[in-house]
Image (cartoon, helix red, strand yellow):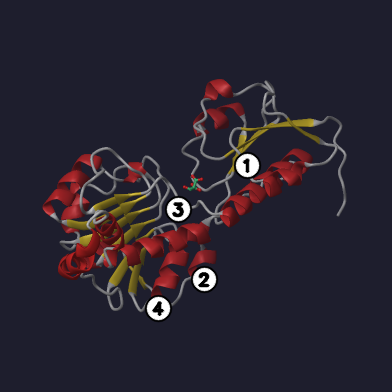
Amino acid sequence: MTTITLDKIKTIKTLNNIAKSGMAVLKDENYKVDNEAKNPDGIVVRSYHMHDMEFNDNLKAIARAGAGVNNIPIRACAEKGIVVFNTPGANANAVKEMVLTAIMASSRNLFQGIEWVNSLKGKGEDVPKLIEEGKKQFVGREVKGKKLGVIGLGAIGALVANDALNLDMDVIGYDPYISVDTAWRLSRNIERAMSMEEVFEKADYITIHVPLTEETKGKLNAEAFQRMKPGVHLFNFSRGGLVNEDDLEVALKEGQIGKYITDFPNDRILHMENAIALPHLGASTKESEENCARMATHQLKDFLETGNIRNA
Ligand code: MLT
């Protein structure tokens, strides 16, 4: 590997804790990591919400160690010529494992069962009898033979779709922007829907894997919920803004949505019996944090040294 010596040391600032193995990529004489720097050449960020006021004239690139870039003012970056990288796919396996866990957990009332058993603390010798009587309320259903709808067949959606086949689920997917690469990696056994509505109407379980944009904001709304099968299980490990919260609350109360598991808590659904909210844990694994950090810093380094822009 050729080592490039830059004419000027580049200053890098990190706005979150970035995995050590990622920062190690920047450990050579060309770089100085200084989190107090006022004029960094590059920024590495995870989920910190940036504001364009934080930009300086020297800033050349922002590397987001993660997939979504909604915490970065993209338009302002474009206007100022600041390049933004993200790390598509680097955390896809982690999110996929979480989504499959959620699908199984919702089918078997896992969270509700745990909460209920915990509530028996202090009941002493009555516990076995209470369990015998109470467990009936948690009878679940099997995912085998049920239809999973996957909206968005990017890095994460494609993995979820392929692996759900191994659970003997039928899978229907929708993505108007699917890449040729992903199309090849997608199992031939996955039914391709012609519209999002088709997925809404056919699926018993629906998981959404699209970025939050003007086009997708609030896409899961009353109209969408009405098209879904009554009692559908819905999973959102992408972004909270994809869902219209008022409509969601109504659909959950009416049971139109049977179960909702999300990584994006909002006040309206907390403590609802059929909703579970997690603290944005989908991509929170050691492996994924390292993958994202390494991909982000490699991209940043490559750009600062050669001007090469690659998003992978
Ligand atoms: C992502 O966008 O990569 C995931 O939501 C996790 C994260 O925000 O870091």
- Within 8 Å: ligand 1 and the Cβ of disc 3? yes
Q: Nearer the viewer, residue 159 or 233?
A: 233
Nearest to N terminus: mark 1 or mark 3: 1
Rounded to the nearest whole Å, what is the CA distance between mark 4 and mark 1? 39 Å
Q: Position of residue 71 (x, y in %)?
A: 48, 35
Where does label 1 land, which residue? 18
Nearest to N terminus: mark 2 or mark 1: 1
Drawn side of residue 137 relative to residue 308, left or right: left
From what the image shows, is residue 234 above or below residue 162? above
- What residue appears at the point 40 percent right and 42 percent down from the top-left corner? 213
Nearest to N terminus: mark 4 or mark 3: 4
- What residue appears at the point 39 percent right and 52 percent down from the top-left corner? 237
| Amino acid at dot 4 | Asn
- What residue appears at the point 75 percent right and 46 percent down from the top-left corner? 25
Q: Which mark is residue 282?
A: 3
Instruction: For the residues labelled 4 and 3, say whether their Cβ atoms are less than 8 Å apart.
Output: no
Where does label 2 land, which residue? 185
| Amino acid at dot 2 | Arg
Label 3's element?
loop
Drawn side of residue 181 relative to residue 307, left or right: left
Q: Confirm whether residue 82 shows in the render.
A: yes
